[in-house]
Image (tube, rainbow, N blue to C red):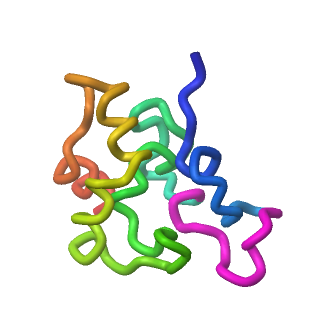
Amino acid sequence: MSKVNCWDFKKCGRIPGGTHEKDLGVCPVHGEKRLDDVHEGRNAGRACWVVAGTLCGGKVQGSFAKKYESCEKCDFYQGVKKEEGHHFQLSVLLLSKMK
């Protein structure tokens, strides 16, 4: 079974050639190669909650510290956490991979 990345799940349109590429830009998650293959996703596609500049509620979000509380409630985050079970990588580990 192929695992779904956040941009496909959320249909945000912030991918190259997407509907919101011109007005909101390409999401930094799409190009975050340091998190490639985390939770079997492409780039940070299954770890978007640790990347600044993602889209939530139609608005571009800021830093991890400012957005994480709302990310924990996100249906995509909850789904990844449930799918990964005991293989779910904690945010502190993911952030350390981005240094």
Q: Percent x, y for residue 93?
A: 20, 47
Query: Would residue 79 appear left or right of 30 to someone viewing this image?
Result: left
Q: Is residue 18 magenta?
A: yes
7 versus 21 height, above or below:
above
Residue at image coords 53%, 49%: 6
Magenta stretch: give its range. 17-30
* Extreme-bottom residue of the structure: 23
42 versus 2 height, above or below:
below
Q: Percent x, y for residue 47?
A: 39, 48
* Extreme-top residue of the structure: 1
Foreground pick, 94 / 1: 1
Specify the quadrant of the image occupied by residue 66.
bottom left
Query: Would residue 8 appear left or right of 63 to someone viewing this image?
Result: right
64 versus 85 height, above or below:
below
Residue at image coords 73%, 84%: 23
Q: Percent x, y for residue 54?
A: 48, 69
Residue at image coords 22%, 55%: 96
Q: Which quadrant: the N terminus?
A: top right
Q: Is residue 22 magenta?
A: yes
47 versus 21 height, above or below:
above
Foreground pick, 3 / 10: 10
Q: Which quadrant: the C terminus?
A: bottom left
Foreground pick, 81 / 75: 75
Query: Would residue 97 appear left or right of 39 to someone viewing this image?
Result: left
Residue at image coords 47%, 50%: 44
Specify the quadrant of the image occupied by residue 46.
top left
Q: Percent x, y for residue 65?
A: 21, 73
